Image (cartoon, rainbow, N blue to C red):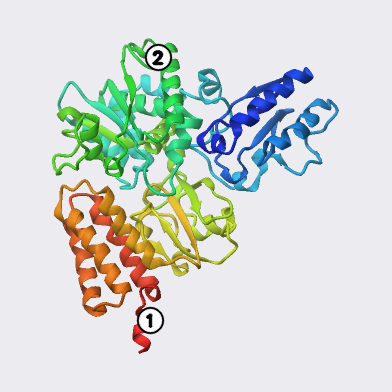
Amino acid sequence: MINIFVPQDTTALALGSDEIASLLTESISSRGLDVKLIRNGSRGMFWLEPLLEIEFEGDRFGFGPITMSDVPSIIDVLEDSHSDLKNIAHPLFLGSVENIEYLAKQQRLTFKRSGLSDPTCINSYQSLSGFKGLTKALSMDSQLIVDELKNSGLRGRGGAAFPAGIKWQTVLDAPGEQKYIVCNADEGDSGTFADRLLMESDPYQLIEGMTIAGLAVGANQGYIYLRSEYPVAHKILNHAIKEAYKAGFLGENIRDSGKDFFLEVRLGAGAYICGEETSLLESLEGKRGMVRTKPPLPAIEGLFGKPTVVNNVLTLGAAATVLEEGSDAYKNFGMGRSRGTLAVQLAGNVKRGGLIELAFGATLREVVETFGEGTFSGRPIRAIQMGGPLGAFLPESQWDTPLDYEAFAALKAMIGHGGVVVFDDTADMAAQARFAMEFCVIESCGKCTPCRIGSTRGVEVIDRIVANEDRDDNLILLHELCDTMELGSLCAMGGMTPFPVQSALTHFEEDFGLNSRRDH
């Protein structure tokens, strides 16, 4: 029997993978072929989706991106029992998928299973070393699990980059019989999709990581706070959780260990601000998503006032890898205080968008030029924004900066969740700066004045600068406004909105009409 794989993640579905799978099933049946169709997760090479893979002699060979009209010719290849899939003369033939340069140059740890099998099949997950980390954790003392995480150097992949082991230690040390594990799956930054991809392609890894976190800090209840715009991830997660309960990896007395952990998915309220951990907790409790004043930290008083670990999808997924491979193996990747790998999500005006997992230390230029192959439009790249809508706009002089939290912080930029958005030379950076302020106007929870009022005034001031109204005075006002927002806002929503605005003013001043003013 030959196995053929067609992805079922959101991106592939949007490009017609369901229709392609249906036609393949019909064609395979009508021709009486001994072929099994498997709906796998995506490899993250979105520029090749829908990517069809055929398993042959222990290797996987790809065709892509395919359309409905390509199905008959691919079926012809399958029907010819004498075909050598290593040397197919087909316009969409990609050769061995593992040898595709885009994938072969990566260092995949968190996403090593992505695209290999049916993401809902728990047996396939176990055959690929799944639950190995949890099995080890079940035999370990809570402190030893936390020590492993601390030794790995894993930092939160949600944006703040706080050491995950320190957060877990705080919750472990906090008094109280009831503690919680909360997964922040409210992935809302522009150009980001790594959380979604992991949940849709390897959901058991998230389940495993959350269960390990529960064992580490003494929590028996977990919640995945999932953004409502991810219906496919919602369906796959619920199916995977049900299977994990059946197999004894969730619930009471996990694998006869005497330890319990319960898990469920809760849908978000459609607000960007709920990506901030305290606003998320408010929403999870059934309240309006508004930022809490800190202290107390969620690790001390979190969900329902109890000690709570709040980590994002990638952090908890990486925790499973740390326990599986060992902390020493994990921290061998990366540089400085940035250990392990980063899931870079390449989007915007780029030729080859997708997920790229690399050890910290690669440069932004390498990611965009080597993997992305430049812009989709074919025009020169002008600016790159990393870290979501609140990230700085980086000019070419900064593209050789290594992907390292401290290196980016030195530029008053951030790595954030790893989203990279590319702009070509037609982009109006003044318009982009205005968008950052306008985004804050729309998405602010409204609790603090610097964010609520500052962003509204920011839009007005930028409009006046571009219109050349009292330009000098308004430039001074804009800088002072940015300082007030950065230093006076309750959370990163208002505190980081100035980053894209200030970087656009510094590096692309001509778009604000500043050069023309100076020439006169």
- Residue type, label 1: Asn
Secondary structure of the residue carrying tag 1 is helix
- Residue type, label 2: Tyr
Secondary structure of the residue carrying tag 2 is helix
The label shown at residue 515 is 1
Residue 435, placed above or below residue 269:
below
Residue 52 point in image, percent of width and height: 66, 34
Residue 236 point in image, percent of width and height: 46, 25
Residue 23, placed above or below residue 65:
above
Task: Please tell me how crowded label 2 is: few (under 14), some (14-19), or many (20+) other residues with Cα within 10 Å.
Answer: some
* Residue 133 shows up from this direction: no
| Residue closer to the observer: 368 or 279 | 279
* Number of marks in picture: 2
Residue 455 is left or right of residue 99, and the answer is left
Residue 514 point in image, percent of width and height: 35, 79
Observer-side mark, 2 or 1, equals 1
Quadrant the C terminus occupies: bottom left
Quickly name the residue at label 2: 245
Residue 212 is left or right of residue 191, and the answer is left
Residue at (34% x, 42% y) in the render: 156
- Quarter location, residue 243: top left
Residue 518 is left or right of residue 174, and the answer is right
